[in-house]
Image (cartoon, coloured by chain):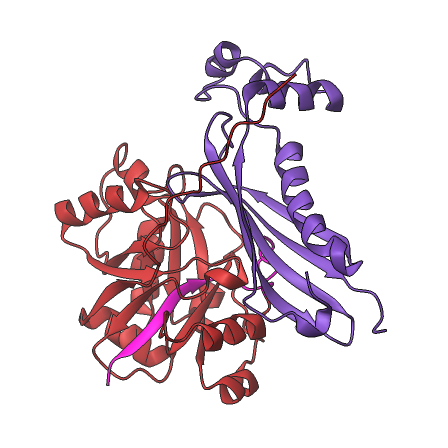
Amino acid sequence: MRTLEEIQIGDNIGPEPLFLEKDRVRAYCNAAGLAGVPRFTDDELARKEGLPGMITPGNMSAALIGKLVTDWARPANARLIRLGTTYRSPVLPEHHLSLQGFVTQVDHGERTAELDIWIENEDGDRLVTATATVKFPPKA
Amino acid sequence: MATILDLHSHSEASEDSRAPVEAYLNWIKLRRRERPVNGIVLTEHRQWNAAGDYRELEDKYGIMILKATEAETDYGHMLVFGVNEDIAKRFDFANIRIPAQELIDEVARMGGVVVPCHPGRPTVGLCEHYASKPPLHNVVAVELLNGGSRRGEDERTAELVAKYGYRTTGGSDSHLVSLIGVCATRFEADIKDIEGLVRELKSGRYQPVDFRAPRKPVPRAVPEQTA
């Protein structure tokens, strides 16, 4: 990524293709203390809750969006200082997803950029949407 | 001259949006070639933003900003255009179970118009309510194109429209800056203010327009090897 001075409203972030295997979701659940929540780990038990199968925890979706932002910000030594997420539809493992977004606002006084980010499925449905604020270092 | 308006958007005045109005206008300016809207209607959730004054922004960007509300009723969510003092006194928009038929009839009597939005959406859309309750009377139009619809929702609305013969509108339902203007309504008439919008919504001389780019296939990720 470039410096704040080079960033423009409308710049793309991603798209980053993403394929979440069920085992990867289960590994996240083990690490995050969610192993005992069947909707995140077991298709059959998730279906008993009325879901189409096991789903990705919201925290994992937020973490993936956060990583997209921090990967974008790191080369400029910028920091993610706020992330807000909206969960519109379950993120199902074993689907071809895409993480992407745009720069929507740039504040040179505060040295921040506002981003729109989302996770999209094969149908183009935005499953999780987010806004993020990235803080850039002072001008050299 | 035709007027193209995004009839459904949420600014940071709605609790689930962080989009400043000026950022919307900036985005429209940036994407005008793809989304040639002349104006937007702010339809904040469960409230009438009487104090909001956007005239300076309108002048700065040359884009019309009108105000309405998205009300919650016993038949799902509905956009209320032409809210005035009488309507604001008559209805408590914070109430999430406003009787829909009463809202439609009373708003019309007091000079406004009600348009059910995202009818095909589960729980909050008209279609699901029509499955268990009698249809509403005096529906002028419904929102056929909603920028936030998931696959199948607008198609379900199209079936409703075919069955009941409703007129149709479009709106982005944007909660994100970058989604403003993706769907809109093209009016045959020149619209300058909210009274003109209400008049034209009742006239029927309009159609929904979809400015979304054709969906590109999601790039195929290579599944990672798990240990």
Q: Compare residues B222 and B60 and report the one nearer the observer.
A: B222
| Chain (purple) | A
Q: Quadrant of residue B107?
A: bottom left
In this rendering, position of residue A117 left or right of residue B120: right
Q: Quadrant of residue A25?
A: top right
Q: Main secondary structure of the magenta part?
A: loop
Q: Residue at x 68, y 45 (%)?
A: A66
Looking at this view, name the residue that lies furthest to the top.
Answer: A44
Q: Residue at x 55, y 69 (%)?
A: B49
Q: Compare residues B211 and B64 and report the one nearer the observer.
A: B211
Please determine whether, in this image, residue B104 is positioned above or below residue A55.
below
| Chain (red) | B
Please determine whether, in this image, residue A53 is positioned above or below residue B207.
above
Q: Residue at x 44, y 72 (%)?
A: B31
Q: Which residues are magenta?
A: B1-19
The image shows residue A29 at horizontal and vertical percentages of 68, 21
